[in-house]
Amino acid sequence: MNRTLGVCYYPEHWPETQWAEDAARMAKLGLTHARIGEFAWSRLEPKRGAYDFDWLKRAIDTLHRAGLKVVLGTPTATPPKWLVDEMPDMLPIGADGMVRKFGSRRHYDFSHEGYLKESKRITLALAKAFGEHPGVCAWQTDNEYDCHNTTLSYSPAARSGFKAWLQRKYQSPDALNRAWGNVFWSMEIGDFDEIELPNLTVTEANPSHVMDFRRFASDMVVRFNKAQADIIRAHSPGRDVIHNFMGRTLAFDHFDVGADLDVSSWDSYPLGFLEDRSDQGDEWKRQFARAGDPDFQAFHHDLYRATSQGRWWVMEQQPGPVNWAPHNPAPRDGMVRLWSWEAFAHGAETVSYFRWRQAPFAQEQMHAGLLRPDSTEAEGFGEAAQVASELAALDAALDALPGKADVAIVMDYPSAWAWEIQPQGREFDYFRLVFDFYRCLRQLGLSVDIIPASAPSLDGYGLVLIPGLFAWSDDLVMAIRDCDGQVLIGPRTGSKTADFAIPASLPPGLPSDILALRVNRIETLRADTPVAVTQDGGFQFWREFLEPGEDAETLLTADDGVPAVVAQGNVTYLGGWPEQALIKSVAGQLAGRAGLVMKNLPDGVRLRRHGHHVFAINYGAETFDLATLGWKGQPLLGDLMLEPSGVAVTSVADAG
């Protein structure tokens, strides 16, 4: 695989006389890809039907002549004012009933049939015009689905679409009433036309109702994306179809969208995400304020690699301070290089920096680029040049793909919706739970694959973790039964049916030959009242009262004598949300039982196996001696003394 670097470029923002110079500088820097066009609808079609593609063709021609490959975006994330004026009901409506107006971006409703038609129309026009242009290597559909919380809309269009969706699913009002338990609080309906949207109710809406609305909304994103992908494939053969996902964005099922993509990508902003989307406390945020969380980027690299069968990019890589977090520090020297190499360690094909030149106007003028607004080189420019030089020297020596990891974590978007709908305790957050397990594995030096709940097989994994899964599928239960590795389940896994009811046999709802266990009751805990399990840690936020069956063995009990960890064969159940010390202890023992090699890593140092090589990266502020982990010899890249922001690559044999 040829690993490459790219950049996001907006020719419509700059004088045309500057384009050729920009393209030449990009190529000289070592960039090979340029993403353009994803926000340009008002310039591409100033008035209905009055297409102006000539400037875009000149821009693509200019980049192509410089040797750059173009990723062309469909502009549907920014519908122009004339279109909004024609169809004002295309605007989304928030859960508060307020219209989300024109004046920024993502101002459309996924379920609006008219806007879907318009999106297909502009996509078709672009695909016909540029589908076989030799400079176009790939397409990006739209931009950052759900950014600014734009998946859910409570509009008349959404209500109409939701009613039709429910009628297809349930066929009759009686079936819907049974599935939702509408006998409760006299919520029964006699006709699908009586269906309302689950907002602005006096108190919480029926969780089954909300869950189906979340499924419907996710399906609308899938439909919207597929419509564009199908058009592009028909008129631009041989080019990849890509979408750029976001960090900690769970409102739609990325696996379902990824099924219609050739490449998943995501937009990686480590410092913004640490400040804006981290559950860690202020001390942690201070420690990594200029580096980013040591596991957040890696988690999303592994997640999005899974959503499109292994092919993935970073479409937007932070090159300097961003503009949108509560605080926006500058990266520590070397971190732009580290983030780039970390992505390649997890199998990225391309890392694309956002953006080429900092904009001197509008909403993102405080967001850094590789160049300053006056075209002088910003700090990230030199680090991108260093990565390009290192890739030229090292790329051919590396394996094409990372290969299967030793450990897998099941990730499930419907579970995120379910526990947002019914958290039971204020702190219960599905992403945080899964991420806590992931971080523990990384602290043990293990490489991780993230897999969907629909995965047909768990073969080849020494350890599989299934935290917080909403409802079992028959396929996953069968995969557990057939799994030769260790399986760690819980907490809250299997606690509902697909219709959002408590299973008749009580959670975790597994056949007794897999795990003879019942959860008789649960409690949620204040953050300052954990339940002790061992001297190393206990349960926080969520705790279950377990009743093991005859074939199950209690491995650990809480201080009050209630079973906390129960096992049967190769399946282990964890009856609460573990503090980090406890999950590290339990997962570490299971990994050892599976014969996996572990390392005890400090907070900022992480390892990632990539085929026949191991990458080491240092998010920390102190130099770390890799020789203490058994590394020996001179690494292919970097040194055994891994400095802050340092990257080292060695063979598996030399990694100890």
Image (cartoon, helix red, strand yellow):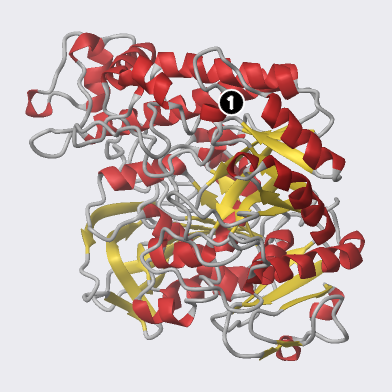
Residue at figure coordinates x 68%, y 22% from the top left: 232
Residue depicted at x 66% and y 23%: 53
Percent x, y of residue 308: 65, 40
* Residue in view at x 71 percent, y 75 percent: 616
**Left or right of 378 in this view: 210:** left
Q: Quadrant of the C terminus?
A: bottom right
* Viewer can see residue 59: yes
Q: Between residue 106 and residue 551, name the one nearer to us.
A: 106
Q: Position of residue 194 (x, y in %)?
A: 18, 13
Q: Nearer the viewer, residue 222 or 267?
A: 267
* Above-or-below relation of 340 to 637: above
Q: Residue at x 37, y 15 (%)?
A: 86
Q: In the image, 570: left or right of 18? A: left
Image coords of residue 341 (percent x, y)? 72, 66
Q: Nearer the viewer, residue 344 or 599?
A: 344
The residue under label 1 is: 44
Which element carries disc 1, helix, strand or loop? helix
